Amino acid sequence: MRGFAFHRNSPNNRDLPPELRDELEQQRKRDLANRQRPGILFYPATWVFISAAIMFSSPTPEKSLWLAYVALLIIAVSGYRYYAMHQFMRKLEVGHEASYIPLLFGASFSAGLWGGIAALSVLPTPFSPHFPLFLTCTLGLCAGGAASLAILGRMVNLFIICLLGPMTLALFSPYATQPGAVGFLLITFGLGMSWISTLPRHEYEVAVLSIIKLSQQAKYLTELTIQDGLTGVKNRRYFDQILNTDLRRASRLNYPISLLLIDIDHFKRVNDRYGHLVGDECLVQTAQTLMRQLQRNSDVLARYGGEEFGIILPGVDAEEAAALAEKLRKAVAACAVWNLSDPVSVTISIGGVSGVPRETMTPKQLLELADKALYQAKSYGRNCVFWSSLDGVLTPIESEKGPQY
């Protein structure tokens, strides 16, 4: 795996391989969404605290009305953010592309609303006697928000501007009831929060990229244990595991399953005549040809033995599976492996079995039925398909026999 490096303030650093960069961005989106969840409730909770403090210290009907109006605004904005967050997470869960815009807009909208409310405490309004309370809560929200949103630099800066900007502008206005020097304090505080947020962002990227790299290495090692080294398709071990799982599921849910065993005709003659390198290339080309014909993610192709392959088709009945088997036979017969200037063609024989399995049926029993159908296809003259029911009744699938060695 190629090495990587990055700088502190460049989450999209060009030194990162594209796959790592994409993984980092996807994880950043998920983490940002999860980190914003507490913030959605934090604004209403903080307003409840402020309202209780104001009404306890100096209650008036006018203040009560103002507090109620602001509470409705905060609840409405929080409700919108919750809905937008839910939609955003749904996109991520189903694998769709999700833009940062809902996260940026939601955070800046809430921060801007709170900043505007806090600015009222600087102007001659019923909130002005409680300026210290508003200032303290605003600084606390700024510090908490900058820490939780630190993993995306532009979101931190936008959040700080929206939160502290309205109060700062109000402090420098001619109508301010507080000294303008407090505005410089807010600017200094905002710049400090923006700078401090770069450290956890850098550490976050290091941690996430390390986890992604370890995950990819683990996935690669897992693939090695279930993949055939020559052909690149799954190996016998994986085939046996999946067959057992799919057979049990089919019997439990009462739906059909089909199993194909495929054998390359007269493969020993290919090795003896052209050599093992050409034989290996025939195996690779046959495996790739078979794989190209499979359309569903649930279909499993594996190298079952030396020149044998197995295909598991969950949810596929006999008619569909037999049609696919004949398609596979023709596709392989149409391919050729070039040995210097001479093309080398091979054919395959296929034995299949389909049906809705009984609860007592084992993978071994299903394999024995498919193997009997394959033996019958080879006895019949090869380059053909034979099918078996779960009762063991064998049926030839009409085909055109090709040239034999």
Image (cartoon, rainbow, N blue to C red):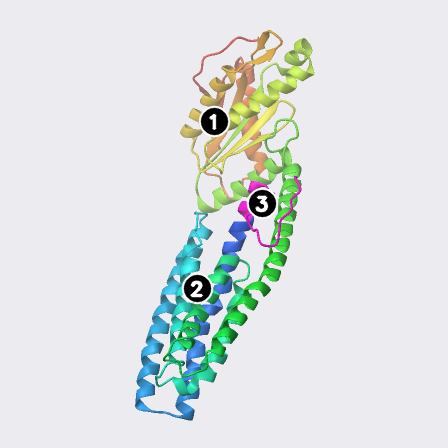
Provide the residue designation for mark 1. Answer: 293
- 2 falls in the magenta region: yes
Provide the residue designation for mark 3. Answer: 20
Distance (Cα) linking label 2 and label 3: 27 Å
Q: Secondary structure at mark 3?
A: helix
Q: Position of residue 61 (x, y in %)?
A: 30, 90
Q: Secondary structure at mark 2?
A: helix
Q: In terms of depth relative to the viewer, which is nearer, 182 or 30? A: 182
- 237 falls in the magenta region: no
Q: Main secondary structure of the magenta part?
A: loop
Provide the residue designation for mark 2. Answer: 107
Distance (Cα) linking label 1 and label 3: 31 Å
**With 223 as the anchor, is 68 left or right in this view?**
left
Q: Which residues are magenta?
A: 1-23
Of circles 2 and 1, which is in front? Answer: 2
Q: Residue at x 56, y 42 (%)?
A: 19
Of circles 1 and 3, which is in front? Answer: 3
